[in-house]
Amino acid sequence: MKTIKMKKKNLIIIYFALLFLFIPKQAFAMHIMEGFLPIEWALFWWGIALPSLIIGLRSIKKKVKDHPELKMMLGLSGAFAFVLSALKIPSVTGSCSHPTGVGLGAILFGPTAMSVVGFCVLLFQALLLAHGGITTLGANTFSMAIVGPIISYLVYKGANKAGLSFSVAIFLAATLGDLSTYVVTSFQLALAFPSEVGGIMASFAKFASIFAVTQIPLAISEGLLTVIIMNVLTKYNLQALKMLRVLSKEGR
Amino acid sequence: MKKNIILLLIVIILGVGPLFIQKGAEFGGSDGQAEAAVGKIAPDYKPWFHTLWKPPSGEIESLLFALQAGIGAGFIGYFVGFMRGKNKQVDEER
C-alpha cells in the first residue's frame, strides 16, 4: 500500500516537473542591480533590513548559547545557501537565475536567524561578484533573507499542522519561500518604477513575469534539494533536529 | 537513499531540460535586459551608483562563483561525513 502511494506521489512530482518545462516565455531573473533603486527606496529597504539583522543576530546568539553543538548545523544552513545561490541554472524562459537556499535554515533555525545568513551571502555577491549591489543590498536582504525565510517557516508550520508528510512540508516550504523572494523583488521594483499606464500593478505584472516565472523551475529544484538534505539529516543527525524542534510532535 | 537519487535526477532534468526546449535562447543573466525593462517604464532613470568592483572578465567571475559553490559544498560534505561517522560510533557503543 505504502509503495503504491509513494509511486503516485513520485508520478505527481514528475508530472509537474515536466509541465513546467513547457511554459514558453522570454525573461530573466536575479537580484536588483546596483544603483537600480532610487535612493529613497534604497534607504527605505535598508531601514527595514537593519533591525531584522539585529533581531537575527540576537536569535543566533541565544540559540548557540543554549546549544553550542548546533553551531555546525548553522554552518550547514549557511553553506547550503552559499552553494545554491552560486548556481546559476538555466530556466524554461531561456535565461538563467539562481535559487536562494535559505529555506533549509529557516526551517531549522527560524526565519530571524536566516536574515543574517542571507545577508552574508548577498554581501559576498555584491562585493566580489558585482551581483546585486550595496545600495540595493537592503532591498535584496528584505526579499531573500527576510520574506523568503518567513514564508518558508510559516508554510512548514502550516503544512505540519495540516498533517502533510515531512518531505512534502519541507518541499513546499523551500519552494514557496524561494518563489516569494522573487515575487517580492518584482514588487520592490514595481513600487520604485510604477508604470505610467496602470501604475504599480501594471509594473508589478511586468517585473513578475520577468523575475518570478523564470524562478518557478528553480524553486522546485530548491525544494527537492532541501528535501534531500533533510533526508540526510534525519538519517544521521536526528538528535539535532529534535533539539531544534523541527520534527512535529509524533516524533517521526 | 534511493529516494534521494530520484529527487536528484528530477533536479538535473529541471536544469538540463530548458537547454533543449529553448534552443536558440541566450541564457544570459539579468543586467542588460533588466536595464531595458526599467528603461521602458522610466526612461529618465539613471542608476546613481555603480558597482565598487567588478570581476575583470567573465572567466574570473565564474571562478569566484565556482569558489563560492566549492567552499559551501566542501563544508556540507565535511559535515555530512562527520555526522555519519559520529552516528556509526554511537551505534557501535550501544
Image (spheres, coloured by chain):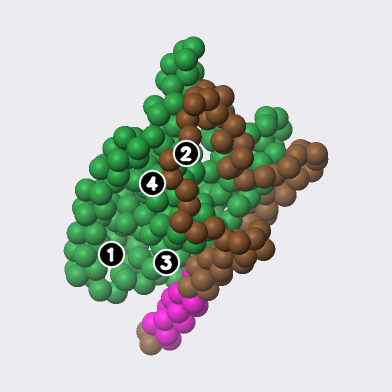
Residue in view at x 37 percent, y 55 percent? A119
Disc 3 or disc 4, which is closer to the eye? 4
Residue in view at x 56 percent, y 35 percent? B35
Q: Within 10 angstroms of label 4, few (less than 14), some, or many (20 or more) residues?
A: many
Q: On the image, numbered disc 2 is attached to which residue?
A: B47
* Dot 1 amino acid type: Met
Can see residue A186? no
Residue in view at x 45 percent, y 65 percent? A79
Q: On the image, numbered disc 4 is attached to which residue?
A: A135
Q: Within 10 angstroms of label 1, few (less than 14), some, or many (20 or more) residues?
A: few
Mark 2 near mark 4, Cβ–Cβ under 8 Å?
Answer: no
Q: Earlier in the sequence, mark 1 or mark 3?
A: 3
Q: On the image, numbered disc 3 is attached to which residue?
A: A76
Q: Within 10 angstroms of label 2, few (less than 14), some, or many (20 or more) residues?
A: some
Residue range corresponding to the magenta coloring: B76-92
Which secondary structure, mark 3? helix
